[in-house]
Amino acid sequence: MVPLISIHLDRPYRAYQGGDELHCQYQVDRVKVDQLQAVEASLLWYTEGKGEEDLGVHYFERNIPTTEDPDIRPMKQFTTTLPCSPLSYEGIIIKIQWCARVRVFMQDGTVYSHDQAFLLGKTPVAQIVQP
């Protein structure tokens, strides 16, 4: 069965500015405790479009089962202060997208991932200007 990955960001419109604190909660459901090898949570940006794609990680944590805490499925959370750049951007040639990402590593080697996009900054969408 495919795990259900839930990500919740603290702002309803998922819009932030540089220097803001972002609070994220995440949880994994619909899998048995012994099926999980690890759960990773990260806050990152990536580019899409022409040319080489780029990626930068702002926050990262990895949870693995331990003898003291063998169940890594319950709700976890983190808080981080957002950087001032790069800002979210939707251009003609390139796009910069921020997201919270949770990756689930299963014992059988399968990896599942879920992203929750958000905006950093108030950069307007680029438009082609006709002469």
Image: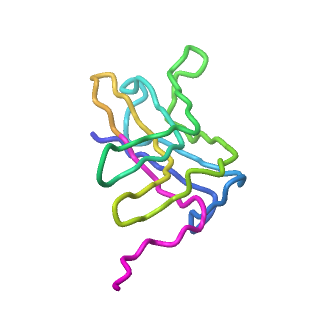
Q: Nearer the viewer, residue 78 or 6?
A: 78
Residue 84 is situated, as x and y percent measured from the top left of the image, at 65, 51
Point out the image quarter for the C terminus.
bottom left
Residue 57 is situated, as x and y percent measured from the top left of the image, at 52, 37
Q: Nearer the viewer, residue 129 or 84?
A: 129
Q: Residue at x 34, y 61 (%)?
A: 93
Vertical position of residue 110 compared to residue 22: above or below: above
Q: Tell me if residue 114 is in the magenta stretch.
A: yes
Residue 97 is situated, as x and y percent measured from the top left of the image, at 45, 54
Residue 27 is situated, as x and y percent measured from the top left of the image, at 51, 43
Q: Tell me if residue 15 is in the magenta stretch.
A: no
Q: Quadrant of residue 67?
A: top right
| Start-end of magenta stretch | 113-131
Asked which colour scheme the image uses, the reply is rainbow
Q: Residue at x 41, y 36 (%)?
A: 103
Q: Nearer the viewer, residue 110 or 45?
A: 45
The extreme top residue here reads 67
128 with respect to 22 (left or right): left
Q: Residue at x 50, y 22 (%)?
A: 64
10 with respect to 93 (left or right): right
Number of marks: 0
Point out the image quarter for the N terminus.
top left
30 with respect to 81 (left or right): left
The extreme front residue here reads 131
Q: Quadrant of residue 69?
A: top right
119 with respect to 113 (left or right): right
